[in-house]
Amino acid sequence: MMPFITSQFLRRETGDRPQVIPQGWSNLAFTGQFCELPDDVVFTVEYSIRSAQAALYELLGMKRKPPPVYKGKFDPRVLYKAFKALHDFPQ
């Protein structure tokens, strides 16, 4: 019934999706899960919000950037909790 529902999980390369604001445009922006944002995971609400923020800030000439992507996989506390969960240590 929905042939493209898994398209977000297919392999892709950089450049497969359009930039939030394509080069050379000043009045067009792509938002949502099918535009290109570096270092982000496409299947999240934050991705859609971050792309909309990036579009608005750029189109309105604001000197702001969307909040940075949280990279928990590099946080030692997160890694320790994951290690404990995987090894089933008693609390």
Image (cartoon, helix red, strand yellow):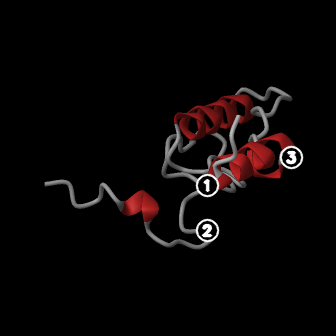
- Residue 36 marker: 1
Task: Tell me if residue 9 comes above or below residue 90 in the rendering.
Answer: below
Residue 3 image point, x, y percent: 22, 61
Q: Which residue is mark 2?
A: 15
Mark 1 lies on a secondary structure that is: loop
**CA separation in Å, label 3 and label 2:** 32 Å
- Position of 72 with respect to 44 (left or right) is right
Residue 16 image point, x, y percent: 54, 68
Q: Nearer the viewer, residue 27 or 37?
A: 37
Looking at the rendered structure, the kind of residue marked 3 is Pro
Residue 53 image point, x, y percent: 66, 30
Answer with mark 3 or mark 2, whichever residue precedes in sequence.
2
Q: Residues within 10 Å of mark 3 (few under 14, many from 20)?
A: few
Task: Tell me if residue 53 comes above or below residue 80 in the rendering.
Answer: above
At 66% from the left and 50% from the top, the residue drawn is 40
**CA separation in Å, label 1 and label 3:** 29 Å
At 34% from the left and 59% from the top, the residue drawn is 6
Looking at the rendered structure, the kind of residue marked 1 is Glu
Answer with mark 1 or mark 3, whichever residue precedes in sequence.
1
Residue lying furthest front in this view?
Answer: 90
- Position of 27 with respect to 61 (left or right) is left
Q: Nearer the viewer, residue 88 or 46?
A: 88
**Marks 1 and 3: CB-CB under 8 Å?**
no
Mark 3 lies on a secondary structure that is: helix
**Marks 2 and 1: CB-CB under 8 Å?**
yes
- Residue 54 marker: none
Residue 28 image point, x, y percent: 56, 42
Answer with mark 2 or mark 1, whichever residue precedes in sequence.
2
Looking at the rendered structure, the kind of residue marked 2 is Gly
Q: Which residue is mark 3?
A: 76
